Amino acid sequence: MSDKEKAFPTLTRRGLLKGGAAVAGGIVGLGGFPYINRLAVRAQETPLKFWQFYAPGGPVASQVEWFEKTVADWNDSHPQKIELEFIPNSEYISGPKLATAFASGEGPDIFIISPGDFLRYYNGGVLKDLTPFIDEAAKADFPESVIANRMVDGKIFGIPMEVEPMAMYYSVKAFEEAGLNENDVPKTWEALLEVAKKLTTPERFGVMFETQPGYYQNFTWYPFLWQGGGEFQTPEGKSSFDSPATVQALKFWQDAINSGAAPRQIMGAGGHDTIANLASGYVAMQNVGIWGISQLQSNAKDFQYGVFRLPTPSNGKYVTVGGGWAFVANAKGRNSDAAGEFCAWALASMDQGSVDRVATWCTKGKSDMPPRNSALKAGGGAFSTGMIGKFAEEIHPGTRAEPRVPPEVYKIISDAIQQTQLGGADPQATATSASQQLDAFLSSYQGAPIL
Amino acid sequence: MTTIAETAARRRHAGRTRLSAKHREWIAGYLFVLPDALGLLVFLGVPMALSLVLSVFEVNGFGGYSFVGAKNYLRMWNDPLFWKGARVTALYAIMLVPLLYVCGLGLALLVQRTDRFNAVMRSMFFAPHMVSLVVVALVWQFMVVDKIGVISRLTAALDIGGFSFLGDPNFALITIVLVSVWFLMGFYMLIFLGGLQDIPRQYYEAAMIDGAGAIARFWFITLPLLKPTSFFVVMVSMVAAVAGAQAFDIIYVMTKGGPANATSVLIVYIYQQAFGFGAFGYAAAMASILVVALMLVTAVFFALTRGGRFNHEQ
């Protein structure tokens, strides 16, 4: 924060209330008025707010149950209580709820963020350093690839609750109707488009990639960039977006649309919604993450599907992207120490309860890969059978963490994807133009490293 | 004998009568307007002034801010997405306003007779306006979805398909305009109905005696006498289109500004910068320019049409 910013502190509602309370306390306290003391005690007893989009009242019972139990267990054993506050997904992920709350100084005490939003909150100075609450053994329990994009200067600012690798899901019925079976599962991009064409009918698309602009679309496109050896920046912090790998990844998604095998418009909540797209029969194959398993188990029990790892270009190697949400504490919250302690207690303690909590979330609450080695062990057989087993054995080993980028970088990449995928722009010209924009931004960027 | 109290009352009464009828009307008029004026000042004037102040600061959305002068305005000048947003907004307004005018007036002419059938038709045409915009957007999104949407199937059956209503940059904005017209035309139909009922019947009777046909009656009586209503409709719909009042909800639900920013009207881009990227100062600068542009458009239109007043010398 600059000196200028310090010189003009923001007047927030909370600040105003605190100031007002202090003045009132100063005036009335002189007379030893007991009411003020009661107010102060009551303020300490006010539960910390935990914002997320799972509970209470969320759409998936097992997830609601997990969150409620976690908070109840904490409240049973700690004086500082915590209260869950459910924010609908559409309001949370790219909506105004968090942004307006922090802008008005009323941000939640505890909340969850994805790597895509990490830098915005870290650079805004609202993420609490959680390192003092995590012991070394627990820190070592998180693989480097999972925790790195939640760390700055060796300190942990977010504790991951899950790892969500991307894959391809397919409808068994659609495959059978097209005379295909699991032996026809494509392994290359070319094969994927060929199979997709065979699966395309007047009422169904063969394959689906996200089409709506947003963080999620970028997230789902990164593996295709990486598979050909592409990156958006060099280790020195300059743009490397103008590369053959970028051009072929942009062109691949464009070809899928131009061939008529992929839709320009998706159904339901978005590209992450397997029920509205794959299970409904709108598409035969869908690019989606591990959470699709629990979606289909909960809401389309009879739907027969298969999963295979992302195909690769002929000149590339297999890699997928792993997203996932993390618990973070508001450094400017009412009791940030307790909030930080809660995050570590819930997900990053060597206590068996903490390990089991992570394992339970990934096996029963939601279908995910655990972010901790001990939780993988604690999950036992759950990670070696069925679809989760397939993810654990075939798909997850090639996972690379979701990049953390500031909004400006996200927007440049998003526009490049949109312009080529749906706007018909030339991939090479688009990559060159986006690269110039990236260089212009990166040369003046100040903040935590972009990873 | 006159008491002191009676004298005082007479004086007070005399004082009241010193106000002319014109002044009393003037005071009453302003008193009627006062609550709304206060509301506008508090909920519109003050935020607009604060937004103007915010536009010369860099605000990160987490309590940090610093004075940057005209930097946000310079950024806007060099931002291709701002200009793209301005172009899309202009296109949206250019398509929406005439279509709304024609559809609103057409519907009003169709159902202006006061019988039971027309009452039902009026309710039907107005009904979309009663539905939440988010619901409207979701329903239309489903109806035009590629391959399986009702309208997509219909266009395919008529052999005019093969395109994506919301996924193709060439059609997405047109689709948004048509959905906006569908939602708004019932409201403007009501405004036009009010205007049509103000036109004296005698004019039409005289014209018919003179042998004027339906087109001549519309052209020489209806249209000229609807001038104040037309002014109101064009003005309000233009301001709504440029400000993106209805467009925002529809676009945010149906396309999120895509594909390839084809439906990213300025208000969507401003929202994205403020709440998506936390660039509140930059968003405030764009909003300020939008307000100025709206004021200019309004002033020019007002001057060109004399505020919809009749020219009595003609």
Image: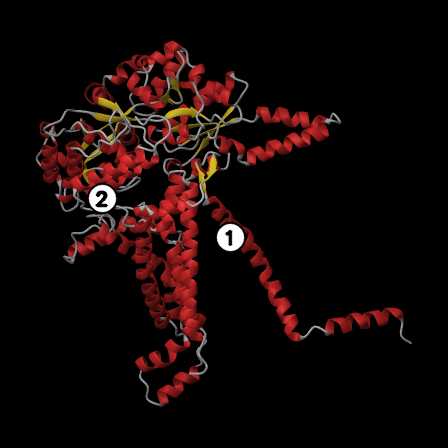
Locate the N terminus of chain B by quadrant. Answer: bottom right
x and y, in percent, of residue A3 in the image: 49, 30
Label 2, on which residue? A419
Determine whether B258 is above or below A274 in the image.
Answer: below
Q: Nearer the viewer, residue B111 or A99?
A: A99
Is B30 situated above or below B19? above
- Which residue: 42% across, 30% down? A55
Quarter of the figure with residue B6: bottom right
> Which residue, as the protein is rendered here, is positioned at the far right?
B1
Name the outermost residue toward the bottom: B210
Q: Which chain hosts label 2?
A: A
The amino acid type, in three-letter code, at marker 2 is Gln
Q: How many marks?
A: 2
Residue A109 drawn at (x, y percent): 48, 27
> Which chain letter matches label 1?
B
Measured in 3D between alpha carbons, the distance from the residue under mark 1 to the one under mark 2, in whole angstroms, is 37 Å
Q: Residue at the location (37% across, 9% down)?
A: A137
Q: Which residue is mark 1?
A: B44
Q: Quadrant of residue A125?
A: top left
Residue A165 image offset from top left, x and y in percent: 25, 26
**Are the numbered discs 1 and 2 placed on the same chain, yes or no?**
no
Q: Is residue A74 left or right of residue B109?
A: right
For numbered disc 1, what is the local secondary structure? helix
